Image (cartoon, rainbow, N blue to C red):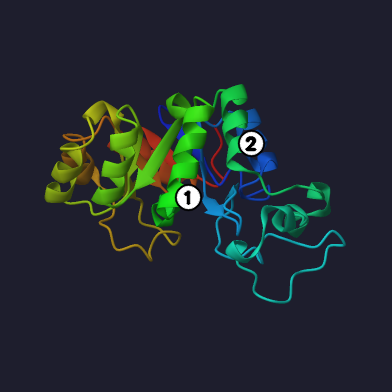
Amino acid sequence: MVIIMSVILEAHRGLSAYYPENTLAAFRAARDRGYGMIELDTKFTADNVCVCLHNKTVNKTARRPDGTALEEETPITALTFAEARALDYGLWKGEQFRGEPIPTLDEALAFSAEAGIPLKFDNVLQRADDTQLEIFFSTVERMDALSHIGFTANRIDFIEKVMARFPAAQIHYDGDISENALAAVAQIVPAEQLTVWLRYHNNRTAWCKTPACDAALVAMTRRYARRIGLWLLDKPEELVDAEAWGVDLVETEGELRP
């Protein structure tokens, strides 16, 4: 099947189908394969260093330097940055990734600037407390990173916080997909700064209760947002649907290639 793509492919947690998720190795692979955006997750350590990690615990992706797994459930919030950094975040995916460290927010932003590839931060940032959010925002300012990042949100109060600090911020909305909800978001975020993410119905997304994407939903959403994203796709035939509906971004873990 030959597909001429007009959509931008976004790498979910980096090229996470083949590389250790939320690591610089996965981010570099996404850059090298030509993906147009990278989605990543953030958490904070016990000493409030912002790092790239999806789960609340490090058990899925962290190993001791000798390759053994951590027996006890270990929240990232229970580890200092030094303790978290002493673990290996590549070995769980394969020996070829040995030595891969947990990246910091600073390192992810520096990579984005150097690689010229934008980052989309997952809505888990909404759970950060005021001190942590200030650390995140201040880092974005210090590294002059606003032009190459986006904030994902499903809550109006968080969108308001981001827009108050960064009026030019790119917002990726993945909350309630109703006319009223989108109108409320559009009151805060200009259409040219707003991307709305719709759910493609497949086994990867069946748990989610938001409406599944179709042509009518895309048409309604387009009245409020400059760009529409579709998640989470992994089959070429799904990409055919994305093209037919005219969406702008497609999230994949790497099964779909640019």
The answer to whether 8 appears left or right of 208 in the picture is right
Nearer to me, 2 or 19:
19
Question: Residue 66 at x, y = what percent?
Answer: 87, 62
Q: Secondary structure at mark 2?
A: helix
Nearer to me, 14 or 216:
14
The answer to whether 78 appears left or right of 174 in the picture is right
Question: Residue 80 at x, y = what percent?
Answer: 67, 58
* Mark 2 surroundings within 10 Å by alpha-carbon count, few (fewer than 14), some (14 through 19), many (20 or more): some
**In the depicted structure, whether residue 148 falls above or below residue 22:** above
For marks 1 and 2, give the one nearer the viewer.
1
Question: Residue 114 at x, y = what percent?
Answer: 62, 23
Seen at 15% across and 37% down, the residue is 187
Seen at 64% across and 36% down, the residue is 107
Nearer to me, 72 or 60:
72
Question: Residue 9 at x, y = what percent?
Answer: 48, 35
Residue 124: tell me if it is visible: yes
What residue is disc 2 on? Answer: 107
Question: Which of the 4 quarters of the picture holds residue 161?
Answer: top left
Residue 2: tell me if it is visible: no
Q: Quadrant of the C terminus?
A: top right
* Residue 249, numbered label: none
**In the depicted structure, whether residue 77 falls above or below residue 21:** below
Distance in Å between CA atoms under marks 1 and 2: 17 Å
**How many numbered circles are shown?**
2
Question: Which of the 4 quarters of the picture holds residue 70?
Answer: bottom right
Q: Amino acid at mark 1?
A: Gln
* Mark 1 surroundings within 10 Å by alpha-carbon count, few (fewer than 14), some (14 through 19), many (20 or more): some
Q: Earlier in the sequence, mark 1 or mark 2?
A: 2
Q: Secondary structure at mark 1?
A: helix
Q: Amino acid at mark 2?
A: Glu
Seen at 30% across and 51% down, the residue is 154
What residue is disc 1 on? Answer: 132
